[in-house]
Amino acid sequence: MNLIHFDIYQQLLKEKSGLVLSTDKSYLLESRLSPIAKKWNFETLDAMTIALQGVPDQKLVVDIVEAMTTNETSFFRDTRPFDMFKDHVMKYMKEARSDKKSLRIWCAAASSGQEPYTLAMILKELEPQMPGWRFDIVATDISHDILDQARQGIYSQFEVQRGMPITLLMKYFTQVEEKWHISQDIKNMVKYDYFNLLDSMSALGQFDIIFCRNVLIYFDQPTKGAVLDKMARQITPDGFLFLGGAETVIGLTDNFKAVPDQRGLYGIPTGPHFAA
C-alpha cells in the first residue's frame, strides 16, 4: 500500500476511533480490510481506498473502523488484575458500600465479552459472602459486530482454555458440540452497549469501578489524557480504575493516581486510598 493511501486510513481511524496506526502496522490494513473491500464489491483494496476520498458511505466507514479496532482479549487475562479486583477492590467495596449494597462497573472496550464475563463470574462466586447485593456491569465497545458476539456468550475450545479455571468452566459453561455457551445467569449480569471513548461519557452515569485495560496504548498522548479526564468525572470519589500493565496515568492527567502497592490500579487523588 502506497504512503498516500496509508495516510487516508491513518487519518480516518484517528478521527473516528482515536486509534493511532503506525507505519509498522500497515500490514494490518491488507489483512483486515481486504475482506471489507470484497464485502462492498470493490475489485481491489485500492478501489475502496479511492472511494474513501470522495463522500463515502458511512456504513463502509463503520465497517473499516470495526475491522481495525478489534483487539486481543481472553478470560482472566493477565490474572493479577482479577486477583486485585477480588482481594483488594471488592474487600474495600464490601465495607464502603455496605449501606446501599450495590456496585456499578464499566468495562470499556469489552471486545468479545471475556473481561466482563470474568468479572461476573468472580462476583457470582462472592455472592454467598455478599447476600442481597446488586451488581451492574456495563460493557461497551466501538464494534457492533463484536458486541453481538459478546451478547451470545459462545466461545471456542481455544477461547475457554486460555486462562479459564476448569472449575469455573464446568460451573458456568455448557458444551454444545464444539462450542461452549456461558450460563444465562452470568449473561444476565452484563449489559452491552455501543460506545466510542472519544464521545462524551456523561450519559453513562457514575461508576464505582472502571476497567479500561490495554486500550490507551492505541491512542496518542492528548487522546489518552482526554479519555482519562472524562473517566475521572464518571467515577465515584473512592472508585477504582484498572489500566493495562503497559499503561499509566503519569504525564497524562492529574485526576488519577496510582494506588500504592497495586500495579495497574488507580484512584482519584483526593480519595481515601491516599489518606495519610
Image (cartoon, rainbow, N blue to C red):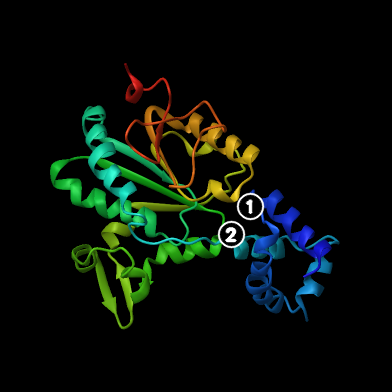
Mark 1 touches mark 2? (CB < 8 Å):
yes
Q: Earlier in the sequence, mark 1 or mark 2?
A: 1
Q: Nearer the viewer, residue 101 or 86?
A: 86
For label 2, the SS is helix
Residue at 31% across / 73% down in the picture? 180
- Kind of residue at disc 1: Leu
Give the x, y percent position of residue 16: 68, 51
Q: Quadrant of the C terminus?
A: top left
Judge whether 181 appears above or below 17 on screen. below
Q: Position of residue 255 (x, y in %)?
A: 50, 27
**Residue 239 locus on image (x, y percent):** 37, 31
Q: Is residue 156 visible?
A: no
Instruction: Name the residue that disc number 2 marks.
Output: 69
Label 1 Cα crowd, 10 Å radius (few <14 / some 14-19 / many 20+): many
Q: Please tell me which residue is depicted at 61% across the width and 65% down the height of the picture.
A: 67
Q: As rendered, which of 127 and 242 lies closer to the eye?
A: 242
Question: Which residue is outermost to the right?
Answer: 54
Q: Quadrant of the N terminus?
A: bottom right
* Residue sitting at x 14%, y 42%: 129
How far is mark 1 from mark 2, CA to CA? 8 Å
Q: Quadrant of residue 206?
A: top left
The count of marks equals 2
* Viewer-closest of 76 and 125: 76
Q: Amino acid at mark 2?
A: Thr
Q: Quadrant of residue 54?
A: bottom right
Q: Secondary structure at mark 1?
A: loop
Please tell me which residue is depicted at 50% across the width and 63% down the height of the picture.
146
Q: Which residue is mark 1?
A: 19
